[in-house]
Amino acid sequence: MDLLQIVIVIGLLLLIVKPLGTYIYHIFSNEPNRSDRIFGPVEKGIFWLIGLKNRGDMSWKRYALSLLLTNLVLTLVGFGVLLTQHWLPLNPNGIDNMGPTLSFNTIISFMTNTNLQHYSGESGLSYFSQMIVIMMMMFTSAATGIVVAIAFIRGLTKKGTGLGNFFTDFVKAHTRLLIPMAIVMTLVLVGLQVPQTLDATVQAHTITGETQQIAIGPVASLESIKHLGTNGGGFFGANSSHPFENPNPLTNVLEILMMWCIPASLTYTYGRFARNQKQGWIVFAVMSILFAAFLSLVYVSESNGNPVLNTIGADTSQGSMEGKEARFGIAQSALFTTVTTSATTGTVNNMHDTLTPLGGLVPMSLMMLNVVFGGDGVGLVNMLMYAILAVFLAGLMVGRTPEFLGRKIEPHEMKLIAIAILVHPLIILGPTAIAFLTDLGSGAITNPGFHGISQVLYEYTSSAANNGSGFEGLADNTPFWNMTTGIVMFLGRYVSIVALLGVAGSLVRKKWVPETIGTFRTDNKLFAGVLLGTVILIGALTFLPVLVLGPIAEFLTLG
């Protein structure tokens, strides 16, 4: 029964990939299509409002600068709202202003599509902040990631000098993709009993005569874009394990599909742009192989139960149910855990801190690789980065100048790719070491030993991968953790974006090289194997030593 549930959800995803991927292609191909009649007038009004008269192609530098400045303006507006939310409207529960370091962490978190929360949603934010800051940034951060992927794809497949127009792409990502999908899914979630209201906290009387405050609010609208945008921040502190955010198995499946559909479908979009659908399916296949391997590990590990409880004769026939919701069980919890960290969403329907050691290894490893579907747009870009690296390594082995989609890969591109690859482990392992060396960092560890190492490592890995989930045993709402994770989130998002846009800008200007008998094909099973090996090899060499100190060592001590 468990396996059938998982197979059905994966089957539903496969049905979504082609139509959604095709629709995304039509949005950004800039070719006339039927959706222009619906969305064209709205977009023209927006372009007029923002004064966008020239919608021509931008160089990669101008595209990147436009992206950064837009994100900066949104960040400053959101930061100001969080610092003053107590005096702003739509605050029926009288929630106070956020402190400066927590506001810094929160605004960076949501602008970078990380959605790491060092606060509890229902008690830390007013309705105004939830809607004007959090939900707004869930849309804009997701749109930012999507347009980066589109610009990168254009750099690989287009002939010309520019990567498109950032503002046109940014508006279209909202008007034609994220907002329509979010509206539909909000209505579906409301129909499935997810709250959507601006009323204040409900006061209830318990059977013992006590008074209980039950938090409600505009939950359904946040849930829809939270998952569609691979954001992850919960309206409630318990996130998608809360019955108001995720009331039943049906909503659980819908949330899995929402956070998975756009990252998976972008592989098909890539194939359409490349005029070779096999290119997209190869990327999808490699991602799927890695996904299936990690899903199998977490499912088997959680199904086998806690080794310590097994040795004392406790009944673990249901598996390790610690930290999991009974309404979801092992299968839906394991699938949700794998999807939320492979798609770098960060929403959780179970407590990752209570996963078995090898179960906890899975979400951590997926975020370290950051290429197994990944967040909206960014995951595809990272996998294509590894594809270029794989072609370069193959070229070195046969003594031939490497080519990818008809463009020669030369030292300039490889230097930028090296920056993007190296910055990820650097901003994870460096801050992790600093945290262990200082009382400000180590003092937050609530579970000393190997699991404490995992807690710290997971926090910085989640921040660097723009995921946002956590081993929530860590006492992380302190100035040290707010500032360090904020810096890691910023670097993890924008350094790689700028570097890879630079790669795209370099490739789009190159002359197309005709394919010959000696060209290393990138649309067959051989390349899929090379790409898979490249991802595993680099990930293993980089992160295996620190994983040995955390979850692997914990597993060996429990066994």
Image (tube, rainbow, N blue to C red):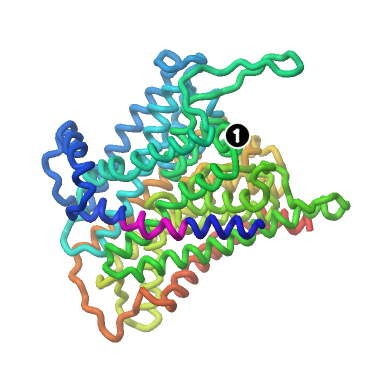
Residue 292 position within the rendered picture, expressed as x and y whole percent measured from the top left: 56, 63
Residue 451 position within the rendered picture, expressed as x and y whole percent measured from the top left: 69, 47
Residue 38 position within the rendered picture, expressed as x and y whole percent measured from the top left: 22, 42
- Quick check: can you spot residue 162? yes
Label 1 sits on what residue type?
A: Pro
Count of marks overlaid on the render: 1
The answer to whether residue 83 is above or below residue 340 is: above
Looking at the image, the residue that sits furthest to the left is 53
Looking at the image, the residue that sits furthest to the right is 313
Looking at the image, the residue that sits furthest to the bottom is 517
Residue 500 position by quadrant: bottom left
Q: Residue at x 44, y 39 (%)?
A: 224
Q: Is residue 453 magenta?
A: no
Q: Give the side of residue 70 with respect to residue 452, left or right.
A: left
First to last magenta residue range:
13-22
Q: Give the side of residue 67 with respect to residue 78, left or right.
A: left
Q: Residue at x 37, y 49 (%)?
A: 495
Q: Residue at x 48, y 56 (%)?
A: 12
Foreground of the two, 538 or 110: 110
Looking at the image, the residue that sits furthest to the front is 191
- Quick check: can you spot residue 436? no
**Number of residues whose C-alpha sits closer than 10 Å to that of mark 1, classed few (under 14), some (14–19) or many (20 or more):** some
Per the image, label 1 sits on a secondary structure element best described as loop
The answer to whether residue 503 is above or below residue 462 is: below
Magenta span: chief secondary structure: helix
Q: Quadrant of the N terminus?
A: bottom right
Mark 1 highlights which residue? Answer: 243
Q: Quadrant of the C terminus?
A: bottom right
Residue 114 position within the rendered picture, expressed as x and y whole percent measured from the top left: 46, 42
